[in-house]
Image (cartoon, rainbow, N blue to C red):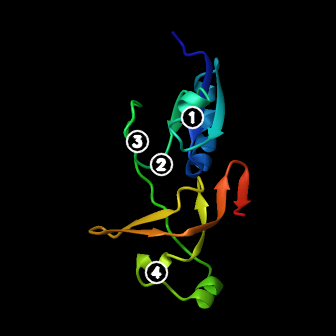
Amino acid sequence: MHPAGTLRIGYHPIFRATLCYRIGEFLAANPTVNVELMITNSPAMLLDEGLDVILRVGDIPDSSFVARELGWTVLIPCAAPAYLDRLGRPLHPRDLSGNRAIIPGRRDEELFRLYDGEHTAISAVEGAAVMRGRGLHRRS
């Protein structure tokens, strides 16, 4: 039996390039399957939008959803030299508080969890812009 029908996939924006790069390979191997893609990191979208699967980043809060870790990724905080010249160079994650950031995902994902191999530090930043959907959205 070969799979057929429409597979509705939700995915975090960080997976956009990888998913789009590999989707052609999947469709070639499964000619009777169509794919619909939606950018989201919310498990609730499985029910709200009728998605079949979500490729997401982060832990799932207590829920009845079944999840499996497929791997991990690293987001690297970085800044333009002119920005650092203007505001100073952070020496500790707590120094990120008060900075403005471009955040991949949702507006409520404004906590950076930084891990150095031994310690985790959490810093809240203002999301001045959010990368979502088709591009960059400026915060109002």
Residue 26 lies in what quarter of the image? Answer: top right
- Contact, CB < 8 Å: mark 1 with mark 2? no
- SS label for mark 2: loop
Circle 2: residue type? Val
Q: Is residue 62 visible?
A: yes
Q: Looking at the image, tell me whether mark 1 or mark 2 is earlier in sequence order.
A: 1
Q: Looking at the image, tell me whether mark 2 or mark 4 is earlier in sequence order.
A: 2
Kindly give the residue lying farthest to the front in the view shown: 140
Nearer to us: label 1 or label 2 = 1
Residue 7 lies in what quarter of the image? Answer: top right
- Contact, CB < 8 Å: mark 1 with mark 3? no
- SS label for mark 3: loop
- SS label for mark 1: helix
Residue that appears at 59% across and 53% down: 106
Q: Looking at the image, tell me whether mark 2 or mark 3 is earlier in sequence order.
A: 2
Nearer to us: label 3 or label 4 = 4
Residue that appears at 37% across and 39% down: 62
Residue beneath label 4, please? Answer: 95
The label shown at residue 45 is 1
Q: CA distance from mark 3 to mark 4?
A: 32 Å
Q: Is residue 26 visible?
A: no
